[in-house]
Structures are given as structure tokens and as C-alpha cells.
């Protein structure tokens, strides 16, 4: 329609040129429309776009506001039930035909790969096509709520057969439009009559831009408006969203129909009770029927996203043109995100586009707590109006928008962040906060499920294969669970969910639809990573403002002013800016006096409280050095006569291994590095009493003791700690209470943290630097390594030929990876409260840098300086600094420690180039006078370390919570420290290169 002074009734009628299939038939009047049922065909031409559209009008006894008649409601209910039954029966019959065809072809019915035979694929494709087309036809007839069902199904490219995607994709925005007469009637009713419409609009295009389940959208132009002060606004291009007449009643009836179907389903199987889902959906859909609510939602989300750096467009509504059934908003040029041809034509960067889309929803869900719960591909456009950027999404339709209570928002944020970080305790905490109750009592499997469900998306080209493998894996896990539960064949497992929050419905819906969109665009996108980034913001903001870190450096660190301290503080600013730290502590003692004491950063990536000098860090293997001190003290005191005595001399339960000596335990040469109970759960490994008995009585050496050095990552605790207890007759921690100076260890826990330690306020949270993550490959079925193109075809064939017992054994192994040793290969597991509280001093000691430094200072201190007697005598210390030699030291000298296997001697080792003395790790330094000196101490997984150089009376301790196998922060910090001390570090302690070592200034 060309712009005029104002639209008239004739103007709008002019564009409804013909009704029915005969172009000479007179125009259908509004009075006649009151009796139209359905089936009227209308041909309409738009002067704005030049399009001519012939449509079959879908009217339901329109009269007044278009409420459906009683008989129409009956017809709809019968149609819904008959279609559901037809689809169900057709699939049942197809299953029977497929089995018969497999027998004819000589295929094994129990083999999942038999479904890939061309004949079987053809059969199922035909059934999918018939059912999909049948659904499409009936959805287009029924409209209302069922359109939303079809839209949802067509958005799940990751799970739905391609036949459904192809057939139902037209429902995204290509529903048959309602007639212009019907639409215009609603417009005039909502805006106060035709005269009012004429004053507001220059023109309205009678051809809708899009038609959906609830409404259709028309392009229009607003009249100029007098803005005062002799100014007038320009004519604005807008769109009018007009609600279908009678759709409210249809939607509510459809929800009732679905409730009936779900009730029947629940009666056949109580575990299939989805009534809570429909109840929640019903509440939200009612809100969608009022466009004033949608305008409010749209405004809030627009303002929320404008406060970020995400390039995304949300239309702005026209405030005085929003009513219950009409919504006027600005017009945004663009095309649907699913239009692959247009994506290619406009050279759209799909990865960038999806990154912006997913980030926009991450902000809505995790930051704002208000999100569009209907992100199907018809509600997202790609803007063609942004110059120089072809990948800007336009977000539409905020009718179905969910608001989260602040506590629930925090719970979901914690869920996503915990899943990303593999943080079991935070995951369990999120479940509690949101009211999700599971009954399988296996948090590791829960975590694996979360990471599968929220992980990287699968391109549509791989979706079928991945879906099949996932299904097979699930079947195996279920069979293993049945065996564990003692169920017989045919018996069902109990539902894994006892209770869940209603908000989970729409949270899951959005997750599935966004992931489906990524799959449809054939992109492998790191969905969880994006969600976790914004979830972290919400978790950090949940910390009370008075408890948050205000500065990088904790204030008490400024009390010491030395060149080394000042230089380190400046370096930390750069390290933090580069993203190579979260929280850390540095302490350097010289002759027992602090020359450096720095606490910097935060307790965790998602805990914005400051690290203080007394913050407790899990220092992992650093406390092996302290266990060593205790055992050497027993040797020094004569309670252990000789390092070469058999262990069983003092620990009778060890008599089955008479060749293992005390020296072998300290030197990692006992052959018991990987001795663990078969099928041990993590609770078993954390049971100190059980494990010390097992290691003494049941464990068997893997090689002749003394002939090989193999790092005892976990078993060192049970061996050395168990021997201390056997000698003293008391818990090993009692010995350290006796031998350590009382003021040296206020922040040192060797036997698990105490009850009064607060998770949030006292404990640094471990996380792994992303480029150094120990990959839980076995838990991620969607990783690159498991994608179809990387799978050997032989593996499937081998599986097909396995007998039933072999398959059961594999199923059992599938569950085992969620239960025991393999979990301890992931450092994030050490954030769990029960792990922190356990006695495992080879891997979970907690300490501050100051406490570590003071303990080792008490070991090396020189009596001549009147600082008291050292814990270990010079002769004992010299003995401990003698390097251990063996015929082979394969594990200790391996190239990397990437944790790729299940061997803890590799996975939990910081650097394999380091040599051992008796329990201590040894490093040969070049001192300022050119002499060589061997240090004592120990590294911990990820970078924490304590190093003591007796000749210089120097102790350096360093703790951190951002773990890395090659920590930049650690290398730079140690480089500065040894540069200032005038020492040259050996290759076993990688540091940032220092050109000219400074001379150590003696005190």
C-alpha cells in the first residue's frame, strides 16, 4: 500500500482482491465472515512487497472475538486422540515389520547396528515420512498449541529424524495465514476503531510477514507524530503482531487435551508421569496470551543485553501501541537463522552467530533471571541491516518468557558452572538449592550426565551416529544398574529422579532448542563453556559485597617492604592481567624471617572472596614431604633401627612382602604405586583404615622392590602414614603435633580439614587451567575423539561379535569409571568436602604458604643462630638428600604428565624430571658463590611447591588454585625469587629466564 494521509476501510479492502477459488467471486464482507467455518481460499496482493499469496483461511466459527464452538472443541479432541493413536500404531507396526525384515535378511535382532541395513533404513524412513506429513497436516488444521509442539520437534536436529525436520520446519513461521478481514477486525478493536487506526498508521501490509501458532505479523508504517517545539518524528517502519481470534480458547483446550493424554500415559507407567510438566507449561502459556506482558518482557531483555558487549538486536515496542491482542514494534530487516542458502549468500559466520545467540541466552538465564523460553529457529533472524557484520542475530517473540526467583537463578548458575568445572560438591549443592532430588546416589555419574547433556553440540551430519552410540551406552549402563540392583530380566529400574523443580522444564527446553539449532547449522559449539562464563558472574555476585576482594593484593602483604616483595607484587599484576592466576600465596623465609609474604587474588574463579595469608590451599603432593619428615624423625630417634629393615619388622601385617624395606617406601621403589582394591569406590579409597590394611595385607608389588622407581601418587600416604602409625601406635598426625614447633603449623591439616573450616570462606577452590585440563574422555561421549569420523569401524564389528558375558563386563566397566580411582585423576574432585575431610596426606593436605615455609624452616634451621634444634639433624638431612638410584625409572622420567591414562603415578605428577632422595624431591641449585647445593621439598599437582636450601637457610613456598602442568605464574614467580636470591635453578624447576643473577645479600 502506498503511503497516504491515513488508511481507510476501502484502503484495506482494496488489497483483498478475491475470495474463494474463483477470481470473479465478489468480496467477502465482514458480516459474511461471521458464518465462515473453514476452507475459504483467499488470493491477496501486497503493494508494499508485490507478493501475491493464495491461502486457505482457517476460521473457527468466528463471531465476536472468534471463540470456538462446543462442537468444534469436540472435533479437536477427537482429532488429537485419533492422530496420536494413528502415529503410535504405525510405529508399532513398523517395529514388527522391521523385526520380520531383519530375520529375512539374517540379521541379529539384538544388534543395534542391524538398524543400519539399507532395507531397514528405508522402512523407517518411509514411516517417519508418513508420520511427519500426517502430523504436519493435522497441526496445520488444528493450529493453536500443537503448532508449538511441531516447532519444538523441528528444532531438535540433534535427536529428531531428518524426515520430521524437513516436514515440520515450515511451522517455524509458515503457517497458513488468517484472512485480512479477521486480522483487521482485531486491530480496529484493540486500537479504538477504524478512525483511530487511520490516525496512527500510514499503511498496513495485508500480507503477513509470518504466521505462527498464536499470532501473525504485518509490516506497517506509523504516521508522523508532533514531538513539540516544531519538531516531528519521521515515519517509522514497524510490524504489528496480531493475535489470532479465538486462539486463547484453542490453546487452553489443547493443553487440557494433552493433560488427558499424559494422564493415560501415567496410568500405564507411573514413571512416565509428565503432569508437572504440563502444569508448569499451562501457567506460562496463559501469560503468553497477553501481549502487554510480552512487551514488558521484551523491554527488560533488551535493556539487559544492551548492558553487555554481545552484538544482538532485540526490537523495541511502541509504548502506546501495545494492547492485550496487538503489539507494535520496530521493524528489523533479516532472514530466519535456519535459511542455509541465505547464510551462504550473506557470508554469515555461523560459529560467531551461534556464539552470540547462546551468549544472549546465557545472559538472560544466568544474569538477568528472565529468558525467552521459546528459542526456535523461527524466532531468531539474522540481521541484514548491520553494515560490515553479517552475523548479528535478531531475537523475536518474548511471549513465552520465564522468570527465575533469585535463589533458583543462582542454583541454575551453579549447576552450569559446576558441570563445566567438573566440581562435584558444587553440583550437589546446586541440586539441593533448586530442589532436584536424585536417588541413584552416584554424583560422578550425575556429573557425567550433566556434561553430556550440556557439552559441545553435535553437527547434524554426525547426530544420527552419536545418538545411536549414546543409546547403546545408555542401554549398557541400565543393564549394569539392573545387575547391581539385583533385578531380574524384564524388571524396570526405578526412576532416577524423585523430585525436580518446575523451572527445570523451561531451562531444559531452552537448552535442547539452542543445542538443536547448533546441530541444525552443522556446528560443533562449546555450549557449556558459554553458559558457564556468565553463570560464574552470578555466583561471584552472590558473595556479599563486604566479603569480596577489593584489590589484587591482600592488604597485609604491604607490611613487608623488600626488593623481592615489591618486584613480585608488580609481576603479579601482569600475571593477573594475562589470566594466568586466580588466587595464590608466596612466602620466602631467610634464617626464619619473612622476606616475602604475599596473598593475592581470589578464593576461586567463582568465589570472589580474597585470598588471605591464612587461606587453606589443597597442596596435593607437597605434604608427602611432611610425611617424609615424620618417618625420618622416627629413624633419627631410633624407633626405626635402619632404613633397610623390612617394613614388616614394624608393621606385622606387611609380612607377605618381606623384601620391601623402609627405604623402598620413601624412595618410591616398593612396587606398590598402583595397588588398589578391585572395584574400589572413591569412598573405599578415602577410608584410611581399610586402605592401610589393604596395602599391608593384600597389595602385591608389581616389580622387585628396589629395581624400579615409580611415583606412588596415592599409595605413599597409606605406606608411609601406615608405617608411622604401626611404629607409634597412634594416628600419624599425633607425631607431627609432637615434633613440629607449636607456632609453625596453625594453617596445616595433614589428616583432613576440621569441621569448623568453612567451604566458602576458608578454602581455596581448585580449578584447572583450560588448556591443561586432565580430560575425562570416558565421560564425554561427544568429544572429538568419539566423533564418527574418528571411530574405527572395526570397534563396532568387534562389539557385535562379543558374547553376553563380555557385554555385561563392558557394561560394568562403564559404571566403574564413575565410582573409584578414575575420579581421583580429576583434580576438581579434591574440592569435594568428603575428600577434603579424608585422611589422604599424599594428595589432599591443606596448608597456607606460610605454614609450609615454617615447617621446612624448622627442618633445616641452623642451631648456631640460636633458633632452636632442627627437627632433623644435619646427618639425617644429608642422608635424605642422597639421590635414589635404580636400574629403571620409567614412570619418573617419562616425558609428560598429562593424565591421559588411569595411572596416578603419571596423572598426579607435576614434573617427571624431578629426582628423589628419601621421600623428598631433590633439585641441585647453583648458589651465588658458584657452589652446588641440593634442596629438599616437594611439588604438588598443578604448581604448589615448597623448596628448602639448607646451605642458604632459605625456604620458598608457593600455593595456587589455578592448576597447570606448566604454570606461567609459578615459573615467573620462582624466576624472580631465585634471581633476587642469586641462585640459579636447575632444569627440574622451570623458571622465566634470568640474564644476570643478583648476588645474595647476607643478613
Image (cartoon, rainbow, N blue to C red):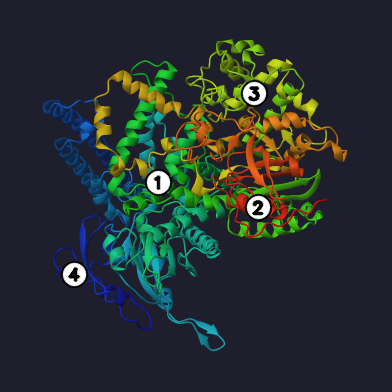
Q: Which mark is residue 512?
A: 1
Q: Residue furthest right?
A: 866
Q: Which residue is mark 4?
A: 26
Say which quadrant the N terminus sits in.
bottom left
Q: Residues within 10 Å of mark 4 (few under 14, many from 20)?
A: few
- Secondary structure, mark 4, is loop
Q: Which residue is mark 2?
A: 973
Question: Answer yes or no: do the residues labelled 1 and 4 have beta carbons within 8 Å?
Answer: no
As drawn, is 463 to the left or to the right of 751? left
Q: How far from the left and from the top, in percent, is residue 804?
A: 29, 19
- Secondary structure, mark 3, is helix
Q: Earlier in the sequence, mark 4 or mark 3?
A: 4
Q: How many discs mark residues in the rendered view?
A: 4
Q: Which residue is mark 3?
A: 720
Alpha carbons under labels 1 and 2: distance apart? 45 Å
Q: Residue furthest front?
A: 930
Q: How far from the left and from the top, in percent, is residue 756?
A: 74, 33
Amino acid at each position: 500500500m502506498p503511503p497516504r494521509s491515513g488508511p481507510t476501510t476501502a484502503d484495506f479492502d482494496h488489497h483483498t482482491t478475491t475470495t474463494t477459488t474463483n477470481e470473479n467471486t465478489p468480496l467477502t464482507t465482514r458480516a459474511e465472515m461471521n458464518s465462515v467455518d473453514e476452507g475459504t481460499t483467499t488470493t491477496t496482493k501486497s503493494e508494499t512487497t508485490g507478493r501475491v499469496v493464495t491461502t486457505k483461511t482457517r476460521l473457527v466459527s468466528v463471531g465476536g472475538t472468534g471463540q470456538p464452538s462446543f462442537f468444534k472443541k469436540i472435533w479437536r479432541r477427537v482429532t488429537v486422540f485419533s492422530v496420536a493413536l494413528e502415529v503410535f500404531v504405525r510405529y508399532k507396526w513398523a517395529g514388527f515389520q522391521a523385526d520380520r525384515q531383519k530375520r529375512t535378511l539374517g540379521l541379529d535382532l539384538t544388534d543395534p547396528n542391524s538398524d543400519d541395513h539399507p532395507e531397514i533404513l528405508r522402512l523407517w524412513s518411509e514411516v517417519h515420512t508418513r508420520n511427519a506429513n500426517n502430523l504436519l497436516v493435522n497441526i496445520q488444521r488444528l493450529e493453536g498449541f500443537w503448532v508449538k509442539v511441531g516447532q519444538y520437534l523441528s528444532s531438535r536436529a540433534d535427536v529428531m529424524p531428518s524426515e520430521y525436520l524437513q516436514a515440520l520446519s515450515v511451522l517455524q513461521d509458515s503457517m497458513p495465514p488468517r484472512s485480512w478481514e479477521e486480522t483487521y477486525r482485531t486491530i480496529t478493536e484493540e486500537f479504538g476503531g477504524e478512525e483511530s487506526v487511520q490516525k496512527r498508521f500510514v499503511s498496513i501490509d495485508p500480507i503477513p510477514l509470518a504466521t505462527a501458532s498464536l499470532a501473525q505479523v504485518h509490516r506497517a508504517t506509523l504516521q508522523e507524530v508532533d514531538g513539540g517545539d516544531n519538531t516531528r518524528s519521521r515515519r517509522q517502519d514497524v510490524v504489528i503482531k496480531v493475535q489470532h481470534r479465538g486462539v486463547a480458547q484453542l490453546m487452553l483446550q489443547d493443553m487440557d487435551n494433552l493433560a488427558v493424554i499424559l494422564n493415560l500415559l501415567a496410568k500405564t507407567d507411573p514413571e512416565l508421569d509428565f503432569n508437572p510438566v504440563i502444569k508448569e507449561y499451562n501457567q506460562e502459556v496463559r501469560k503468553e496470551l497477553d501481549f502487554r506482558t510480552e512487551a514488558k518482557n521484551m523491554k527488560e531483555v533488551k535493556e539487559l543485553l544492551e548492558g553487555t558487549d554481545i552484538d544482538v538486536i532485540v526490537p523495541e515496542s511502541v509504548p502506546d501501541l501495545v494492547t492485550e491482542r496487538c503489539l507494535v514494534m520496530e521493524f528489523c530487516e533479516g532472514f530466519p537463522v535456519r535459511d542455509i542458502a541465505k547464510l551462504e549468500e550473506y557470508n554469515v559466520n555461523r560459529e560467531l552467530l551461534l556464539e552470540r545467540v547462546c551468549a544472549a541466552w546465557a545472559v538472560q538465564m544466568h544474569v538477568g533471571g528472565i529468558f525467552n523460553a521459546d528459542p526456535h529457529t523461527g524466532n531468531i533472524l539474522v540481521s541484514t541491516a548491520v553494515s560490515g557484520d553479517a552475523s548479528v542475530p535478531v531475537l523475536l517473540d518474548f511471549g513465552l518468557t520465564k522468570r527465575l526467583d533469585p535463589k533458583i537463578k543462582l542454583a541454575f548458575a551453579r549447576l552450569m558452572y559446576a558441570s563445566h568445572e567438573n566440581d562435584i560438591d558444587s553440583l550437589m549443592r546446586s541440586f539441593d538449592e533448586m530442589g532436584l532430588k536424585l536417588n541413584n546416589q552416584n554424583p560422578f555419574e550425575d556429573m557425567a550426565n550433566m556434561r553430556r547433556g550440556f557439552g559441545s553440540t553435535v553437527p547434524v551430519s554426525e547426530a544420527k551416529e552419536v545418538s545411536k552410540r549414546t543409546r547403546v551406552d545408555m542401554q549398557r549402563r541400565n543393564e549394569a544398574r539392573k545387575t547391581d540392583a539385583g533385578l531380574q530380566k524384564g524388571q524396570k529400574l526405578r526412576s532416577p529422579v524423585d523430585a525436580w523443580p518446575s523451572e527445570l522444564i523451561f531451562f531444559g527446553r531452552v537448552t535442547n532448542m539452542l543445542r538443536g539449532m547448533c546441530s541444525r547449522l552443522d556446528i560443533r559449539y562449546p555450549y557449556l563453556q558459554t553458559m558457564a562464563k556468565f553463570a560464574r558472574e552470578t555466583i561471584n555476585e552472590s558473595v556479599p559485597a563486604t566479603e569480596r576482594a577489593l584489590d589484587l593484593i591482600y592488604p597485609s602483604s604491604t607490611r613487608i617492604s623488600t626488593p623481592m616483595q615489591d618486584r613480585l607484587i608488580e609481576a603479579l599484576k601482569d600475571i593477573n592481567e594475562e589470566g594466568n592466576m586466580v588466587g595464590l600465596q608466596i612466602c620466602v623465609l631467610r634464617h626464619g624471617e619473612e622476606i616475602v609474604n604475599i596473598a593475592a587474588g581470589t578464593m576461586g574463579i567463582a568465589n570472589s572472596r580474597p585470598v588471605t595469608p591464612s587461606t587453606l590451599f589443597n597442596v596435593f603432593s607437597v605434604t608427602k614431604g611432611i610425611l617424609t619428615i615424620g618417618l625420618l624423625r622416627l629413624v633419627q630417634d631410633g624407633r626405626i633401627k635402619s632404613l633397610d629393615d623390612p617394613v614388616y619388622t614394624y608393621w606385622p601385617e606387611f609380612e607377605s612382602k618381606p623384601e620391601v624395606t623402609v627405604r623402598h617406601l620413601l624412595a618410591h621403589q616398593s612396587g606398590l604405586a598402583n595397588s588398589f582394591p578391585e572395584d574400589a569406590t572413591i569412598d573405599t579409597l578415602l577410608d584410611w583404615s581399610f586402605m592401610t590394611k589393604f596395602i599391608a595385607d593384600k597389595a602385591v608389588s608389581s616389580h622387585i622392590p628396589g629395581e624400579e622407581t615409580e611415583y606412588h601418587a596415592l599409595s605413599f600416604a597409606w605406606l608411609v602414614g601406615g608405617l608411622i602409625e604401626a611404629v607409634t601406635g597412634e594416628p600419624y598426625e599425633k607425631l607431627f603435633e609432637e615434633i613440629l614447633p607449636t607456632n609453625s603449623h596453625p594453617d596445616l591439616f595433614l589428616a583432613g580439614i576440621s569441621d569448623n573450616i568453612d567451604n566458602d570462606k576458608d578454602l581455596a577452590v581448585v580449578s584447572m587451567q583450560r588448556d591443561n585440563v586432565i580430560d575425562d574422555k570416558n565421560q564425554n561421549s561427544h568429544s572429538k575423539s568419539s566423533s564418527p569420523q574418528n571411530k574405527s569401524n572395526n570397534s563396532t564389528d568387534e562389539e557385535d561379535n562379543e558374547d553376553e558375558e563380555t557385554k555385561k563386563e563392558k557394561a560394568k566397566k562403564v559404571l566403574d569409571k564413575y565410582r573409584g580411582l578414575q575420579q581421583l585423576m580429576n583434580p576438581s574432585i579434591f574440592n569435594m568436602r568428603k575428600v577434603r575431610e579424608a585422611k589422604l596426606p599424599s594428595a589432599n593436605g591443606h596448608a597456607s604458604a606460610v605454614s609450609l615455609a615454617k615447617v621446612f624452616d624448622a627442618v633445616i634451621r641452623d642451631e648456631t643462630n640460636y633458633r632452636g634444634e632442627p627437627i632433623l639433624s644435619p646427618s639425617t638431612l644429608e642422608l635424605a638428600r642422597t639421590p635414589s638410584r635404580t636400574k629403571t625409572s620409567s614412570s619418573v622420567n617419562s616425558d609428560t604428565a598429562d593424565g591421559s591414562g588411569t595411572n596416578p603415578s603419571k596423572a598426579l605428577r607435576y614434573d617427571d624430571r624431578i629426582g628423589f632422595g628419601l621421600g623428598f624431591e631433590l633439585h641441585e641449585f647453583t648458589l651465588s658463590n658458584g657452589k652446588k647445593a641440593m634442596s629438599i621439598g616437594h611439588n604438588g599437582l598443578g604448581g604448589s611447591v615448597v623448596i628448602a636450601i639448607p646451605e642458604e637457610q632459605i625456604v620458598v613456598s608457593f600455593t595456587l588454585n589455578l592448576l597447570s602442568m606448566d604454570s606461567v605464574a609459578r615459573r615467573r614467580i620462582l624466576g624472580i625469587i631465585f634471581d633476587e636470591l642469586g641462585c640459579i635453578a636447575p632444569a627440574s624447576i622451570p623458571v622465566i629466564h634470568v640474564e644476570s643473577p643478583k648476588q645474595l645479600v647476607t643478613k
